[in-house]
Amino acid sequence: MKHFINLKDIPAKDLRKIIADAKKRKVLRKKLSTLEVDKGAPLKGKLLIQMFEKSSLRTRLSFYLAIKQLGGGTLTLRSNELHLGQGGESIADTAKILSTYGDGFMLRTDSDKKVENFAKYLTIPVINGLSPSSHPTQVLSDVFTVEEIKMKPISKLNICWIGDSNNVLDSLIAASVKFSFKLSIGCPKKFEPGKEVRAWVKRNNKKIYIYNDAKKAVAGADVIFSDKVISLNDKVNKKKKIQAFKDFKIDEKLMSFSKKQGTIFLHCLPRGDEVSDNVFLGKKSHVWQQALNRVHVQKSILLYCFGKLR
């Protein structure tokens, strides 16, 4: 049994094994319909319990399909429907029940501490479907997508992030260390990555490149990533934040500063005004392929957590 909580804590060789397995599984599914089960049904009889404290579309759908295609089943809970959400039951007691009824637990939460506490008390694997400081399933799938499109290891590519410093960027920074790729970050000074994540990069003898000029950040980029600047639960002054990011909108002009013909655009969704329609819906955008790949990679993450990775 292995947890999947933060890319920082997972050995690089294990992350590479997950991606290699996902690649094989995607090829083998080409002739299968959506709910047909993979050959051998490796997770037959297994139940994945999912709990959502935050809104979800792609994570909810992709994990549902992932466990179904592996031969297992899923049950989705909302925290406000449980005694836990009403403050009447401890995480320790809730974890005991989850471990009794289920075989794996996927949590999407507004608390990093809650993920850690569940991992402490569960006797089944816990997967972080998103927390304030980490979105590991999204970013590992993004690494898969980049390598699929570019047909080369991500370590040989220049990756750029334009946007806010959030949980997706924190995981992308962790991935840059684990997979040894150059990561350039373009954001306003006030919205640079925090000291803790930068210190972790330094402790691992790696470096990230931070620019307060979007044009400098995208120079030489093979891939440009972004995310919604104003998230659903953002508690900042939204007008001021939008104003701070006015020079960081990803449009065709900014894309041209990469100076590379084959530069691609990726976005974890949902999108806002941080990217123009011309880019988001254009030929350089691969956002729908990126979203679908969540299923294939999360299948291999599930197998990793269940100790069944080939």
Image (cartoon, rainbow, N blue to C red):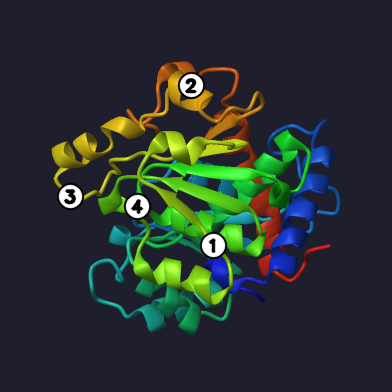
SS class of the residue under badge 2? Answer: helix
Name the residue that disc number 4 marks: 54
How busy is the neighbourhood of tag 2: few (under 14 within 10 Å), some, or many (20 plus)? Answer: some
| Badge 1 or badge 2: first in the primary sequence | 1
From the viewer's perspective, tell me whether residue 95 is left or right of residue 21.
left
Tell me residue 211's x, y (percent): 40, 47
SS class of the residue under badge 4? Answer: loop
Please report the residue visible at 67 percent of the width from the left and 59 percent of the height from the top.
179
Could you give the CA–CA distance between mark 3 and mark 1, rounded to whole angstroms? 29 Å
Query: In this orientation, which residue lies closer to the viewer: 297 or 80?
Result: 297
Name the residue that disc number 3 marks: 236
How busy is the neighbourhood of tag 1: few (under 14 within 10 Å), some, or many (20 plus)? Answer: many
How busy is the neighbourhood of tag 3: few (under 14 within 10 Å), some, or many (20 plus)? Answer: few
Could you give the CA–CA distance between mark 4 and mark 1, rounded to whole angstroms? 32 Å
| Badge 3 or badge 4: first in the primary sequence | 4
Q: Which of marks 3 and 4 is in front?
A: 3
Type of the residue with mark 4: Lys
Quarter location, residue 229: top left
Task: Indicate the quadrant containing the C terminus: top left, top right, bottom left or bottom right.
Answer: bottom right
| Badge 3 or badge 1: first in the primary sequence | 1
